Image (cartoon, rainbow, N blue to C red):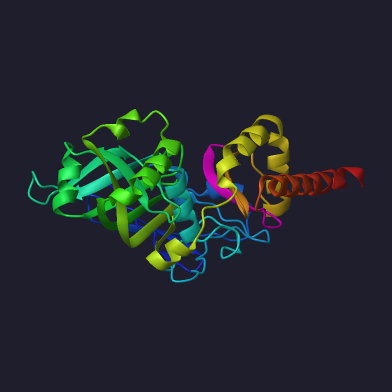
Amino acid sequence: MFRRCLPVIENSLVLTKSCASNVVVTKQCIFSPAKPRSLRSSSWTPTIGSQEFFQKVSSSSSSRRLFRPKATGDEKEPLVGDAPGKAGTDRPSFAEESRTLVQQAATCFLATSSVEFEGHPFGSIVDTACDDMGRPLFAISTLSAHTRDMMKDSRCSVTVQQKDFKGIQDARVTLLGLCAKVPEAEVPECKKIFMAKHPEAFWVEFADFSMFRMEEIMKVRFVGGFGRAGTVSPKKYFEAQPDPVSAFSPMIAGHMNADHKESIIAMLKHYSNLEVDEANIVALDKVGMDIEVAQGDQKWKQRLPFISVANDRKAVKDVIVEMTKTAAKAVAKPSSE
């Protein structure tokens, strides 16, 4: 059995291996200004489930290091993350990312306090939508266990994941709060919102179905991937807006990955000083993109910030075109001299 701990002390990563003989061997790996490929030269490499424990972090220099980004607003200080040096500005805030995830979600994990099992947590997958305040909505049967639970105890939690969620490197958010039936006067509008997300949900008109809503959000816990986590206050959550680029992110990513893969690799080399063998954009937002990269047998998600904020589709296109042209010139320059 092996137990590995990953405490971060400034720019170092401490790995601890506990053996059956109770002898503890500790190795300290310093992420110095060496090229990323040097990470594979170590004679002792931990094999913890997946490569996310080796998140690569780029900065404005050639230095490859782990760092602790500064927290913003009332969010608690996140753990070690994967963003480049200007972590406070190259991603949307945790509140914005939380609102975006809830806005995009079509299903969620609803956890209630079970009536049948005397308060034991009871979780189920349900369809969801959200109103313009970011409050989750549900159209659920009065015969369902979670409905009975919420009628007796309104406390619950709602967890949603990013689209195409694959594992702990991907984003998710949990909202803790109180759920209740929507007042009759607001039911038509809530049904309209729900049907826009679920046009096939004809059952919302059945007599035994009711509209529920998380009326009070008490706490928001956001996890943006390995090492990116924090608590968002309800105030910050309600003040934030969903990211304006996220709705058409899949279309842009698909086009770039299919037709401009070399440009993605060139942008990573120019703007992040990172040479990779493969690169695929997995998501975009108004301030940058997340790229799944491969370097030999290692894979991870790399953040590439935009050179300027892009709040609509045209702006995103303009920024990417400018970045690809600049990167292409930088790559071509050495060969022309």
Q: Against 310, is 195 above or below? A: above
In this view, which residue lies farthest toward the bottom?
74
Residue 302 counted in the magenta span? yes
**Does the image show residue 319?**
yes
Please tell me how many numbered marks the rendered image carries: 0
**Does the image show residue 278?**
no
- Left or right position of 331 against 202: right
Residue 85 counted in the magenta span? no
**Residue at coordinates 49% horizontally, 54% vertically from top-left?**
97
Q: Against 144, is 88 above or below? A: below
**Residue at coordinates 44% horizontally, 62% vertically from top-left?**
238
Q: Against 159, is 205 above or below? A: above
Where are the magenta residues, as a range? Answer: 296-310
146, 231: nearer the viewer: 146
**Residue at coordinates 30% horizontally, 38% vertically from top-left?**
126
- Left or right position of 122 against 201: left
Residue 218: percent from left, percent from top: 31, 63
Residue 180: percent from left, percent from top: 24, 52
Residue 187: percent from left, percent from top: 33, 46
211, 329: nearer the viewer: 211
In this view, which residue lies farthest toward the front?
185
282, 17: nearer the viewer: 282
Residue 276: percent from left, percent from top: 64, 42
- Left or right position of 66 against 332: left
- Left or right position of 299 against 216: right
